[in-house]
Image (tube, rainbow, N blue to C red):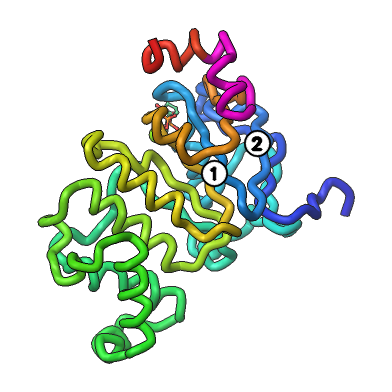
């Protein structure tokens, strides 16, 4: 069993991925432990979404190890990794827009409970499921929105619904891929508040371009450039790093 990680949480070691000749993950190692609030930043095309896809099982790494609480998760499918406790939201929203917010929120709860689509109508009247939907609506400040069709919501609120759906899976690791993408800056505080209100023991990795949001919610920042980790540090260390300023922050922080 040498080389198998035994630490708590998600551990990535020496991860590599290429598409043909293009290296999109280059010897990436990092760990996400309970309570972590880490951000992954880097220019467009750096490989941030690809990294998420490697962790969640959308893509298979060319080499490297992925363990969760010491268990090798590489053989697990996407669904298997969700069951194991790894959930994510997508850079582009993934909601059923013609359904109500309630109907969307019910789906991951039913999935978690292992109910089939046949149980769906009955679940309409399942008090425990409905109570859980209500709690999520309250937690994400969507209490008045449950009966609305998703497409009628402001975009920032749609991103909150998506975050609520991921949380409904009761994950232990949550990866948020650009939760503020496309969200007007007036609504971005809603996203920051929702992230701040996530369960404390959850391990959170947030991929984000909005540096104000990153500095508000993350206590560690990992900088990815051309598929490789350039550096990792506290927000203060990262914002003071001249390489990071040159590469990425310059455009945002003058
Ligand atoms: N399925 C794919 N096939 C080939 N190239 C891909 C694929 N997915 C992503 N890429 C390439 O990998 C690189 C990293 O992309 P991505 O992970 O989306 O970056 P980021 O999320 O940091 O903007 C880009 O050059 C992109 O064009
Ligand atoms: Mg991306």
Q: Quadrant of ligand 2?
A: top left
Residue occupying the far left of the picture = 152
Can see residue 114? yes
Residue neighbourhood size for the residue with mark 2, other residues' Cα within 10 Å, grouped as few (<14), some (14–19), many (≥20):
many
Q: Above or below — where is 222 with respect to 43? A: below
Query: Who's the residue at 49% across and 8% down the image?
Result: 246
State left or right for residue 148 relative to residue 17.
left
State left or right for residue 17 relative to residue 193.
right
User: In the depicted view, which residue is nearer to us: 60 or 238?
Assistant: 238
Of labels 2 and 1, earlier in sequence is: 2
SS of the residue at dot 2?
strand
Can see residue 81? no
Q: Does the residue labelled 2 lie within 8 Å of ligand 1?
A: no
Query: Who's the residue at 56% across and 57% down the image?
Result: 200
The residues colored magenta run 230-244
The answer to whether the residues at label 2 and label 1 have Cβ atoms under 8 Å apart is: yes
The residue to which callout 2 is attached is 15
Query: Who's the residue at 45% across and 80% down the image?
Result: 114
Estimate the x, y position of residue 207 in percent, counting from the top left: 45, 37
| Numbered tag placed on residue 4 in the rendering | none
Quadrant location, the C terminus:
top left
Which secondary structure dominates the residues rendered in magenta?
A: helix
Q: Above or below — where is 11 with respect to 110? A: above
Location of residue 177 (image quadrant): top left
- 231 part of magenta stretch: yes
- How far apart, in angstroms, are the residues tagged by discs 2 and 1? 9 Å
- 53 part of magenta stretch: no
User: In the depicted view, which residue is nearer to us: 120 or 139?
Assistant: 139
The residue to which callout 1 is attached is 54
Q: Above or below — where is 93 with respect to 180? A: below
């Amino acid at each position: 069993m040498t080389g198998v990680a035994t630490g708590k949480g998600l551990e990535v070691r020496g991860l590599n991925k290429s598409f043909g000749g293009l290296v999109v993950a280059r010897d990436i190692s990092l760990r996400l432990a309970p309570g972590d609030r880490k951000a992954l930043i880097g220019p467009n095309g750096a490989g941030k979404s690809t990294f998420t896809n490697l962790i969640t099982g959308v893509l298979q790494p060319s080499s490297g190890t992925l363990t969760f609480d010491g268990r090798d998760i590489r053989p697990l499918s996407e669904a298997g990794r969700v069951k194991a406790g790894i959930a994510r939201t997508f850079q582009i929203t993934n909601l059923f827009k013609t359904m109500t917010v309630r109907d969307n929120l019910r789906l991951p709860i039913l999935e978690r409970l292992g109910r089939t689509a046949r149980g769906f109508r009955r679940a309409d009247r399942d008090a425990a499921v409905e109570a859980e939907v209500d709690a999520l609506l309250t937690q994400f400040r969507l209490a008045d929105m449950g009966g609305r069709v998703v497409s009628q919501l402001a975009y920032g609120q749609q991103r909150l619904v998506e975050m609520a759906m991921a949380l409904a899976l009761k994950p232990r690791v949550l990866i948020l891929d650009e939760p503020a993408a496309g969200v007007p800056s007036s609504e971005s505080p809603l996203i920051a508040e929702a992230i701040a209100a996530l369960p404390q023991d959850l391990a959170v990795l947030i991929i984000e371009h909005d540096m104000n949001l990153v500095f508000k919610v993350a206590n560690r920042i990992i900088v990815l450039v051309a598929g490789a980790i350039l550096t990792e540090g506290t927000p203060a260390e990262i914002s003071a790093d001249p390489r990071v300023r040159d590469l990425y922050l310059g455009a945002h922080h003058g």
